Image (cartoon, grey):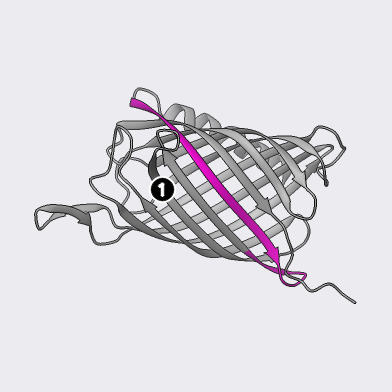
């Protein structure tokens, strides 16, 4: 299992770098404010609750609103299965703007595996998304969301976190975290962007007692548009809270 994860990690980095060569690229500067909640209500079951406010031109203009929820099944301390629903509202922004604001509905399934590597915390995440995107169409002398177009997307993330003042990431621990995530579209309705995007992230974090983790970091996001030519190179400052507060009643 460990060898398969290592080979896969280096393979998708190679593919992502090759896929964006010789494209028309524009740069944007964004700011994202994020909340991630993993809340157990039994020993095996829990909720995933997520909100992201994404802004363009640093924080001046809206970019996206993302609301994601799911049901977690914790097979053990290192393996978690999740399935859920996600709503995304995308606004016209940047140098390749959409014609109008439009919504997207997603169903998603996920496997997350944590692999201890001495002091390093390695998390691999495999996610499938069934997307229903209402791209803008011209109707009645204006652009408005059209009929939903169904596509599929596969996402593969590998994240590494290293504690700085403890041997593990426990309460009151500062740490450094980095990840890379590849997005691949597939299905009959995919245009010329089978390679959808790649995200590379570097952050510093702190484990807050009784709450979770606070991180501030930089995300480089490469997005290939459906025409297969235009590419967004997004430089994004992120501030995120990841809470693990449990909904389980304390035993008396």
Which residues make up the magenta segment? 24-47
When asked about the image quadrant of residue 3, the answer is: top right
When asked about the image quadrant of residue 6, the answer is: top right
Q: Is residue 42 magenta?
A: yes
Residue farthest toward the bottom in the current orientation of the protein: 252
* Residue visible at 39% across and 24% down in the picture: 21
Q: Is residue 209 above or below residue 180?
A: below
**Left or right: 248, with 62 as reference point:** right
Prevailing secondary structure class for the magenta stretch in the rendered image: strand
Q: Is residue 27 above or below residue 31?
A: above
**Could you tell me residue 149's position as x and y percent?**
30, 58
Secondary structure of residue under mark 1: strand
**Of 185 and 222, which appears nearest the observer?**
222
Q: Is residue 185 magenta?
A: no
* Residue visible at 39% across and 44% down in the picture: 63
Q: Which residue is mark 1?
A: 64
* Residue visible at 64% across and 58% down in the picture: 37
* Residue visible at 32% across and 49% down in the picture: 190
**Could you tell me residue 189's position as x and y percent?**
30, 53
When asked about the image quadrant of residue 177, the answer is: top right
**Could you tell me residue 146's position as x and y percent?**
23, 59
């Amino acid at each position: 299992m460990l060898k398969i994860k290592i080979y896969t990690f280096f393979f998708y980095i190679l593919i992502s770098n090759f896929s964006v060569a010789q494209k028309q690229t524009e740069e944007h500067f964004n700011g994202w404010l994020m909340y991630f909640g993993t809340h157990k209500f039994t020993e095996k079951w829990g909720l995933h609750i997520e909100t992201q406010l994404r802004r363009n031109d640093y924080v001046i203009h809206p970019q996206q609103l993302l609301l994601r929820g799911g049901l977690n099944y914790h097979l053990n301390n290192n393996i978690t299965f999740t399935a859920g629903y996600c709503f995304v509202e995308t606004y016209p922004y940047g140098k390749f703007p959409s014609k109008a604001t439009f919504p997207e509905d997603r169903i998603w399934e996920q496997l997350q595996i944590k692999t201890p590597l001495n002091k390093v915390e390695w998390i691999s995440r495999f996610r499938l998304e069934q997307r229903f995107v209402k791209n803008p169409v011209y109707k009645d002398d204006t652009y408005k969301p059209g009929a939903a177009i169904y596509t599929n997307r596969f996402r593969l993330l590998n994240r590494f976190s290293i504690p700085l003042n403890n041997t593990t990431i426990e309460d009151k621990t500062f740490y450094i975290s980095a990840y890379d995530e590849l997005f691949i579209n597939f299905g009959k309705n995919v245009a010329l962007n089978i390679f959808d995007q790649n995200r590379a992230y570097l952050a510093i974090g702190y484990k807050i007692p009784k709450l979770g983790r606070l991180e501030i970091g930089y995300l480089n996001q490469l997005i290939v548009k459906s025409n297969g030519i235009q590419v967004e190179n997004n430089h994004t400052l992120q501030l995120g809270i990841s809470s693990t507060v449990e909904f389980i009643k304390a035993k008396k």
